[in-house]
Structures are given as C-alpha cells and as structure tokens.
Amino acid sequence: MKTLPKSCFIPFETTRNDNCNIIWINHAYCHENNINVDDFIKHLEEEYFYVTDEYTTKSRQNLNDKKIFYADCYGSRYQAANGGSARCGYDGKYQVKGIGRTPLCAENIDIHHSTGKLTLSDACLEAIWGEICNIYFPFGSVRTLAVISTGELLSTDYNIGLESIQECALTIREFFIRPAHLERNVFFRPSRGWESLIEYESTRVLDAQKKVLLSNGEDKSQAVLDGFKLKLAEVISFSRLACIPHGSITSSNICLNGKVIDFGTMTSVPGYKNYVIARGQRGTWDEDVEISRWLRHVTDGIIRNDFSIRHFSSEDFSTSIATKGAEVISRLFCVGDLIKAKNIYDDIASYGKTIRIPFCGEWDDHLLNYLEELGKSYDVHLDHNNLNLRKEHLTQENIKNFLFDALNKRRKNSNIQYEMDFFISQI
C-alpha cells in the first residue's frame, strides 16, 4: 500500500453484489480532477459492487466473483473500540465505507455498531457535509466520491425505541492518514478467529510511525506533530466561530493534513453557547479537553518508540487554539487588527457558555445582535455576512428531514442525484 506499511492493513474477502446501483456521483470532484464521469461510473461498477459474505444472503451474491479489500488498523484510548476500520475496505485506490463487518470489528461493540453496514440516508448525509466542509473548512474534507445503493435493509433503532427500516449503501472516498493510525489500540478485543491481531499491534504502530514520521531516515516527528496540532487548532477555532461544530473530533475523525472526515454528528448551531452535539462528547467550547487527552495518548506512544519529540502540553495547545481563533476572527469578520481580533476571540470564548442541546427552538438573531454590540466595543465592524453556514436548514435534523423526503421521492422514481446536487448548490 502506498499510504501506510503492509502491517497496517488486514486483508478480507468480498463477494460481488449485483443488486448494487449507483445513485449519486460527485460531478464537482470529477470536474476538478479531470475525471471522465462515464469512465468513473464504469470503474465503480467493475471494482466496487462488492460486500462481505455475511452482508447479505447467498442468493444475492455472485459467488464466482471475489475481491480482496484491506481494513486499515488504527488505535484508540477507549475501552470499547474496534481495531480500526470495522466497516471500510481499501483496495489501494479508494476506500469503501459500509462494505460489511471486517476483521477489525471488536467483540465488545454493541450490535447496532457492528453490522458493518451504512444506511443510505447516512451515506447521503456524509456526502452533503463533505462538500460543505471541503468548500469552507480551512483544510477541506475527505469527500464522498459516489454513493452506491446495495438494496439491503437495516433496522436502525440504536436502543432508543424508535425502530426504522432503512436501505443500505456504500460510499466511495479517498484514503488519508489519521492520527489514530499512529496510535496503539490498548483495549481492542478482536472477534473470534482474529485473536492473533493483538500480537502484531505494537509492530503495526511502530511501522506506521516510521513510515509517517521519518524522512530518508531522519526523525521528523516533532515537525509533523507540530504542523498537525496547528491545523487541528485552526479547525477547532473555525468550527466554533462559524457555528458548524463537527461534534466528535477524535483521533480517527480528522486527518493529519487537517481534512475533516466522518460527518455523522456535524450540524449548524444558532450561536456561541456550549452546545453538546454528540452523546458522550463534551460541548463545542470545551471539546479541546477530550481532544488533548487523545493527543497526549498519541504523543506518549510516539515517545515510547524513541522518537525525538516533546511531551504534549494541553496549555500550549489551548494557546494555539486562541492564536488560530484570532486569525479566524480576522478572516471571518474582516478584522484587520490582529490584537483586536485576539481580544474579540477571548470575549467570544468567555461569552455565556451555558451547556445547551441544539434544536431547542432558539434560532433567532441574538448572535447577530451580540456581534454588532461586540464590534462597537472594539470600534470595528464585524462583517457577519461570512457566517453564511450558520443556517437553520443546515442542522443535522433538517438535513435528515430533507434526505427522508428525497429518498421517499426516489422510491417514486425521483432523481436523487438532482435532489442532492440542488441542495448542495444552495449552501
């Protein structure tokens, strides 16, 4: 594999599923990368209509057509964690999400997070947010290149008593290295038959660290980690100030180049309160506490393997977020004076940080009034026109409602490609 050493990938077999159907192609991506759409569609049909054997019944599989994909191993500091990509397969060109259970699915993960499947609505949700984040976020995003319906159905009650039966899908995306690829998975409990994966975990981590942190044998670990932390600090400050929090920035939900990935918790919020977006995560304005913990876990693992790198400092990281916050204020609100921008960021960061759950009917112009008064106190005009992502229709709930309607129309032969492209074009 070009991106990580062989030891970081676990091969698994898939079978062709002839029930697959391409329902959305990222035409913008194809245009930007000079990819012929017809050739791309043909390539997808030939190479990515595959799922694991247990994904569906034998009658829906072409048992004479097999293909090997690879699950990428990565770490975590959490006690209930998969060994890496539990439902993604990589063939050296693209990564497929929702391909079925891979060997990296842990024994102690609940049934609703271990099917290996991805619902069509979640696949479309990720495609929409991937395009939005690629346009607006500082370093872009890992974009969905195509959505493929598999024709399979999945119950998605997630233990909350609201069962719904949804169609399943595959998403096609590029492969990028994440901090978690350099992190050891201390608590991974492999599924039966894959216990040997634990034996190679320390070797896998060291191999990945050498590949990423060495350049022609020279230790570049400090430069790589410092560069990543600055990118991460900018992503955090931008998402806060633009009112579009990711909701769950873990070591596996952001790439080393700063691109954001996995958008299941992404949403738009009304203002600068400390919104809790995802279950088990902190609020938007103190998510850096949890992020600092996994940064320390990653850094300590690199130090243990004798790389020349300083211990992680949460204080330094907080300073980086504030510094990047001032730069974002300068760009987002057209404030030329960086000292004033820094003071404005500090004011916003300390403003009314009551923990709130979003979607509580408080969408109004309070934030715009607050920014107007804040600008007056510093004798600057805070141009809030750039807060164009802070829109009520970009809440997670409203996008899901749009997709529910669009997918229902699809069953009546409506064009989901048109519906999604039109929605994205309105952002």
Image: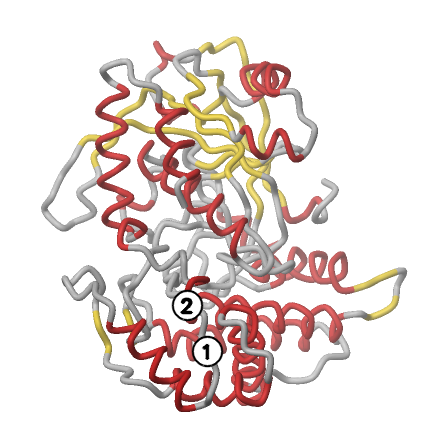
Q: Residue at x 72, y 79 (%)?
A: 309
Under mark 2, the amino acid is: His
Q: Residue 308 location in percent, x, y?
A: 77, 79
Drawn side of residue 232 relative to residue 115, left or right = right
Q: Which colour scheme is used?
A: secondary structure
Does residue 425 sit above or below 219 in this rendering? above
**Which dot, 1 or 2, sits closer to the camera?**
1
Q: Residues within 10 Å of mark 1 (few under 14, many from 20)?
A: some
Quarter where residue 174 is shown: top right
Q: Quadrant of the N terminus?
A: top right
Please determine whether, in this image, residue 98 is positioned above or below residue 376.
above
**Element type where label 1 sits in the image:** loop
- Residue in view at x 16 percent, y 49 percent: 159
Q: Where is residue 167 in the image (x, y as percent from the top left)?
A: 28, 27
Distance of label 1 from label 2 (alpha carbons): 9 Å
Q: Which amino acid does label 1 sit on?
A: His
Q: What element carries label 2?
A: helix
Residue positioned 42% across, 65% down in the render: 242
Q: Of all residues shown, which one is farthest toward the right?
A: 216
Residue topped by disc 2: 384
Question: Which residue is more in the foreground, 81 or 311?
Answer: 311
Q: Is residue 314 left or right of residue 421?
A: right
Residue assigned mark 1: 381
